Amino acid sequence: MDSGGGRVSAEEQAFTLPLDRFDTDLLPPEARTPGTPAFRQAVSDYLTRAFGGFGGRAAIVVDDRQISVRWNPESASPAGPFDAAIAHLRSGRTPQGVQMLELLLTRDPDDVNLLFNLGIALSEARRLAEAEDHFNRAVELAPDFADALVALGVAQLRQQNVETAIETLERAIAIEPDNPWAHRNLGIAYLKLGEDPEEAVEHLQKAVERQPGDQGAWLALGDAYAISDRRTLAEHAYRRAIEINPHNDLAEVARKASTKLAQPNL
């Protein structure tokens, strides 16, 4: 496609992505070798289809070094690339959502909202080191962004950096003392640390008080009660976790924990 030439107008948006940042799994198997004509055509076709749904005009150029997109949106366009990326993520199409967010970030590398949402997507895809980088940048730009701190703490926890995660989640709670996700994950972190179940109980109690439908928090609270030998409270927490959704994996874990709790030599 024609690159358009000339100076970027006030309405036009331009994005440039290195070839190695394009997810070749989004392309046909025969077109996944960067630098080949088939690759260039497949990337161009993919992005043409993607931007074609946003209205306006898009020009895509793929050369031996990078992918360039110049998009002139229409003022009446119902949705843009960011909305499409979030829709992909919400529908479970994580690779497509990540790819669009990475493209948008090349134009606005300090956009906190982009950094946060891309970090969330990467964390869910277990690309944890990359997610942590994006969350760290978001927090650097917006130090009081409590949800970014919570997400950073979760990424650190998933990498088994438990003590670092605890420090991060404590920072989040200092900013938002009633944040249920901060309390939930801090409680889980203290459980993983294995030193003081009472710290875990305290934060998990606050999590379920603020978010009574959080099945994972009830399950973790049951574990914290069981470790501190409060069997009646543990049984109640496991039962509550099962009641919230009896048919998923968390409910099955809660059932097994409850059965084990009933054994005399726990």
Image (cartoon, rainbow, N blue to C red):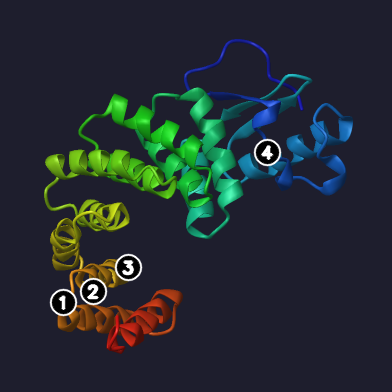
**Proximity of marks 2 and 1: CB atoms separated by less than 8 Å:** yes
Q: Quadrant of residue 190?
A: bottom left
Front in this rendered view, residue 58 or 229: 229
Residue 215 visible, this orientation: yes
Instruction: State the separation of the CA atoms marked 2 and 3.
Output: 15 Å
Per the model, the C-alpha gap separating discs 3 and 1 is 19 Å
Three-letter code, disc 4: Leu
Identify the mark nearer the N-term, 2 or 4. 4
Question: Which quadrant of the view contains residue 188?
Answer: bottom left
Which of label 2 and label 3 is nearer to you?
Answer: 2
Tell me the CA gap for discs 4 and 3: 38 Å
Q: Is residue 191 left or right of residue 156?
A: left
Q: Amino acid at mark 1?
A: Arg
Kind of residue indicated by mark 2: Ala
Q: Which residue is mark 1?
A: 230
Instruction: Kindly identify which numbered label has been placed on residue 226.
Output: 2
Q: Earlier in the sequence, mark 4 or mark 3?
A: 4
Residue at the top extreme, as displayed: 7
Marks 2/1: CA–CA distance: 6 Å
Secondary structure beneath disc 1?
loop
Q: Nearer the viewer, mark 2 or mark 4?
A: 2
Point out the tag, 3 or 1, that comes first from the N-terminus. 3
Labelled pair 2, 4 in contact (Cβ < 8 Å): no
What is the x, y in percent for residue 226?
23, 74
The residue at the point 42 percent across, 36 percent down is: 132
Q: Secondary structure at mark 3?
A: helix
Q: Is residue 73 visible?
A: no
Q: Which residue is mark 3?
A: 216
Residue indicated by mark 4? 47
Mark nearest the camera among 4 and 3 is: 3
Tag on residue 12? none
